[in-house]
Amino acid sequence: MHGDGVGAARAARRDEAVRAAVEQGLLGPDTPIVGLLDVEGIRESAAELRAAFDAVVAPGTPVLHAFAVKATPLVPVLRLLHEEGLGAEVASPGELALARAAGVPPSRTVLDSPAKTPAELREALALGIAVNADNPQELGRIDALMRPADSRSPLGIRVNPQVGGGSITATSTATATSKFGVALRDEGAREWVVRAYAERPWLTRLHAHTGSQGIPLSLLAQGVGEVYALAEETNRRLGRRQIDTLDIGGGLPVDFGSDAAAPTYAQYARLLAETVPGLFDGRYGLVTEFGRSLLARHGTVVARVEYAKSAGGRPVAVTHAGVQVATRTVYVPGSWPLRIAAYDAKGRPKEGPHVVQDIAGPACFAGDLLAEGRALPLLEQGDYAAVLDTGAYYFAHHYAYNSLARPAIHGFARDGSGGVGFAVVREAQTPAEIVAESGGAHARALTTLRTPGRR
């Protein structure tokens, strides 16, 4: 299961953390599920991203790596990435609030969303946050907001290069009918974009995001190439270098089948340098918006096996991790498979012959399975199942089926003396908080309404 090199080191840190979590009481009968974040791994990913682009861009080129907050919307994570030199890409008032709480300055924040309200736009412009307009109607709203006073916000238009989709339709954002951006190949769209820049000297950016998981690097590069070509055409036709920054989105996929770090940021940056000549020659500032590829590898959900049973001759480990933390995997397992690692009751990697078994979650429906027919050392009552590569789009995206509580999340790092230290990232949700979020303060609200004919 463990890859070599970086993957092996990451797996070793994970093993140490699971054992330490059990020893220190973060995991046990009364705390049967927890999320763990590898702080050293997060720092390494941020450094790899910066180094990959530093190696190909011309010296002095302004580059902002804005982490896609949607991937892991946790304030301590955003703060850590900010201190590692990254900004934030936000797509809602909530995500903007998280970035601000983490101390990410407006100058290193980008607002993207297909449904920005006037209030959201007004706030972003007042703060000086970069905004990518998704469509002509949104650009019209920005026009109205720009008239009273100029904004410090860098402003641009998001386009859909319509280069096609990958293996997962839901994460392919450059298809012919994607809901995002101005569809470049639709009749009249390209001319509208050029005219929009001609009429608005304050539009200085151009943005596209081709997709994420399931998108091959070649398609990502093709999408970037289309945006670069449009910027060149627009500047040439306007007779001035008005577009000065290209926001090329994120989208680097993750291999969830192994610990291998592939593809890498360095591979992607080199491919862009080869296939989009001129992109890195210093004429354009750059913005990236990576998310999953930065955090996925560095998160693990660990859940206690509450019961071990058998059904139809197949062993079933019933754990406390299921649809509430791995929603995509449970509902669409073919597109979002996850690896499971087996640990014994003391948090040590479990040994023994591999047995085909199901790893089930706690929710009350038959399909709540983390893995079906998976060969692992046999999980027994009191053991732990670790759901790997869940640092992005998993344990921070709680799905409240059965009113299951959000698990605690702890960051971990080696303490320099052979041990592992932990820090609380998010506390476990309490039953009282579940009641409060479910209208507990308004228990009698519906009984006070009177319908005609009733007393």
Image (cartoon, grey):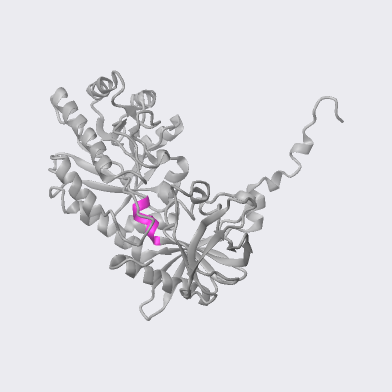
Observer-nearest residue: 98 or 172? Answer: 172
Prevailing secondary structure of the magenta residues:
helix
Is residue 335 covered in magenta? Answer: no
Observer-nearest residue: 218 or 238? Answer: 218
Residue 100 seen in render: no
Q: Quadrant of residue 449?
A: top right
Percent coordinates x, y for residue 9 in the rendering: 33, 70
Observer-nearest residue: 161 or 383? Answer: 383
In the image, farthest residue toward the bottom: 417
Residue ID at (38%, 32%): 180
Q: Which residues are magenta?
A: 292-298
- In the picture, which quadrant includes the C terminus? top right
- In the picture, which quadrant includes the N terminus? bottom left
Residue ID at (23%, 41%): 221
Residue 208 seen in render: yes
In the image, farthest residue toward the right: 455
Residue ID at (67%, 51%): 435
429 versus 201 height, above or below: below
33 versus 149 height, above or below: below
Is residue 293 covered in magenta? Answer: yes
